[in-house]
């Protein structure tokens, strides 16, 4: 059970998140090719590669500093529309955790609540629009419903809810992003960005639970 992460431990966790996304590049492109333009894995791969490089060069930093460095790497490395959306998942954590010495369950809930709100504000997507919000929204609810101090257990509950959200995107028509032009042809396919969001939460859960998965 993990109650708290030090900045050094968070740095390791973020490297594991980056490794998971980089390993999933082909799968994310395959999913995006069914309902989008097929580049989601390319952008995410570039973004999380740059995030890992910036993190490795960051020297001593507190939690907020590490999250900001990592998130800005995603923003600039991925570019396009999705760089700010996915980088924002981490830069919002930096704002929510300013001055915090450790990451604990209440802090992580504040981080991901802020990430959800910023994503919706930036992209304009509502739950049900077949986007990353459909993974993020149930994940944040699961974190807020979670009782106890076990950070790894809380991220596991969030990841499980996010994967259930990904599954539901198969039955949704797109309301945002490129796939909205497909209309009913998007049915039957899961959203690529919801999938990568669930992968991020899953990697966080595994890393916080000591499973290198
Ligand atoms: N307005 C939006 N709000 C929330 N998520 C969005 C929005 N638009 C797209 N997405 C998410 O981004 C994913 C697509 O990411 P991708 O990296 O392929 O970007 P893109 O739409 O091709 O645009 P660009 O190439 O300009 O970044 C979608 O699967 C969806 O989950
Ligand atoms: Mg795309």
Image (tube, helix red, strand yellow):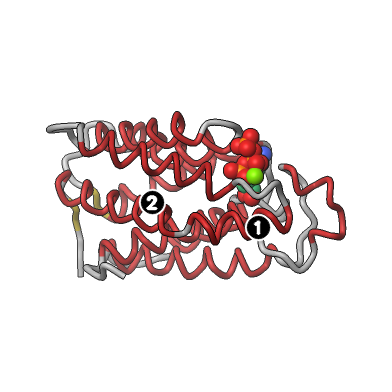
**SS label for mark 2:** helix
Q: Quadrant of the N terminus?
A: bottom left
Which of the four quarters of the rendered structure image does ligand 2 lie in?
A: top right
Pointer 2: what residue? 109
Specify few, some or many for label 2: CA neighbours under 10 Å numbering under 14, 14-19, or 20 or more: many
- Please determine whether, in this image, residue 40 is positioned above or below residue 69: below
Specify few, some or many for label 1: CA neighbours under 10 Å numbering under 14, 14-19, or 20 or more: many
Name the residue furthest right.
184
87 on left or right of 7: right
204 on left or right of 39: left
Percent coordinates x, y for residue 34 in the rendering:
72, 58
Pointer 1: what residue? 191
Query: What residue is at 26 percent from the left and 62 percent from the top?
Result: 208
Query: What residue is at 26 percent from the left and 54 percent from the top?
Result: 13
In the image, 13 versus 144, the foreground residue is: 13
**SS label for mark 1:** loop
Of the two numbered discs 2 and 1 in the rendering, the one whose residue sits closer to the viewer: 1
Percent coordinates x, y for residue 62 in the rendering:
18, 35
Residue 35 found in image quarter: bottom right
């Amino acid at each position: 059970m993990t109650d708290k992460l030090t900045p050094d431990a968070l740095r390791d966790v973020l490297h594991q998140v980056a490794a998971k996304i980089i390993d999933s590049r082909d799968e994310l492109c395959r999913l995006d090719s069914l309902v989008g333009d097929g580049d989601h894995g390319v952008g995410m791969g570039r973004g999380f590669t740059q995030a890992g490089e910036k993190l490795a060069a960051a020297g001593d930093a507190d939690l907020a500093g590490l999250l900001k460095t990592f998130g800005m790497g995603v923003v600039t490395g991925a570019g396009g529309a999705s760089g700010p959306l996915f980088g924002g998942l981490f830069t919002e954590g930096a704002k929510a955790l300013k001055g915090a010495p450790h990451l604990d369950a209440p802090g992580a809930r504040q981080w991901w609540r802020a990430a959800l709100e910023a994503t919706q504000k930036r992209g304009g997507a509502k739950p049900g629009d077949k986007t990353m919000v459909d993974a993020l929204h149930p994940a944040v609810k699961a974190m807020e419903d979670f009782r106890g101090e076990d950070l790894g257990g809380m991220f596991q509950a969030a990841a499980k809810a996010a994967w259930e959200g990904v599954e539901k995107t198969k039955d949704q028509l797109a309301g945002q992003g490129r796939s909205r032009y497909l209309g009913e042809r998007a049915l039957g396919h899961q959203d690529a960005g919801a999938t990568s969001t669930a992968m991020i939460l899953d990697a966080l859960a595994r890393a916080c639970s000591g499973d290198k998965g």
